[in-house]
Image (cartoon, rainbow, N blue to C red):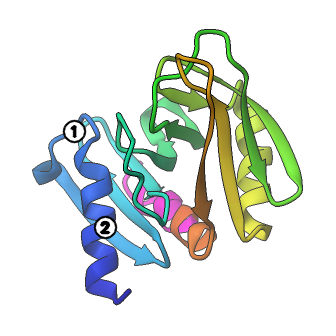
Amino acid sequence: MGWIGRILVCSAAVAGLATPAAARDALGIFGRWGTFRDARPLRCFAISEPPSRIRDATFRPFASVSTWPGRDIRGQIHFRLRKARMAGAPITLSVGERRFALVGGRADAWAPDARADAAIVAAMRSARSMSIATRTENGRAFADAYALKGAATAIDAAALGCARLR
């Protein structure tokens, strides 16, 4: 996929986020990862969608790593799942050979704390792919997979994109 295609894919990924796209600055595209900055509240983030289209998705899945300078938050992990998950079902993130237990809501997942965020970002820097797995509301297992080529650079670009504006 060329750089124009990657921009379109990443722009489409962020279209589902709460902030209007018009208020968003694109900071760069790195592999399958895009980096963006929102002005209000100030936030910079790296974001990606799974490489393959999922036909049975209820939600548009994505993985993101955010920096919120006004809240003193750096490297916060967030996943939008493609399906609503079963209440209480465990959510497991696999990054390379490492496994992490996540917490979540109906269709979102996060690291349980800042220490886990940091461990996940560190694992992402050296792995080729990651996947997040849980169960749907009807009990079926599912997983979304992400390529990590470009993720480290996108995460760094997000941190730099907000560092200058603190």
The type of residue carrying mark 1 is Thr
Q: Quadrant of residue 125?
A: bottom right
What segment carries the magenta color? 156-166
x, y (%) of residue 60?
A: 35, 44
Q: Is residue 48 above or below residue 21?
A: below
Position of residue 69 measured from the top left corner of the image (x, y, whole percent):
46, 41
Residue at 50% from the left image edge and 28% from the top image edge: 108
- What is the quadrant of the N terminus in the image? bottom left
Question: Dot 2, how many residues are within 10 Å of its Cα: few (below 14), some (14-19), or many (20+)?
Answer: some
Depth check: 103 or 68 in front?
103
Q: Earlier in the sequence, mark 2 or mark 1?
A: 2
- Name the residue tied to disc 1: 19
Report the Cα–Cα distance between label 2 and label 1: 17 Å
Nearest the eye: 96 or 17: 96
Q: Is residue 12 left or right of residue 92?
A: left
Q: Which mark is residue 9?
A: 2
Q: Is residue 21 magenta?
A: no
- Vertical order, 84 against 145 (above or below): above
- The image position of residue 9, as x and y in percent, is 31, 67
Q: Nearer the viewer, mark 2 or mark 1?
A: 2
Q: Tell me the amino acid under the disc marked 2.
A: Val
Secondary structure under the numbered disc 1 in the rendered image: loop
Q: Secondary structure at mark 2?
A: helix
Can you name the residue that lies furthest to the left here?
Answer: 22
Pointers 2 and 1 in contact (CB under 8 A)?
Answer: no
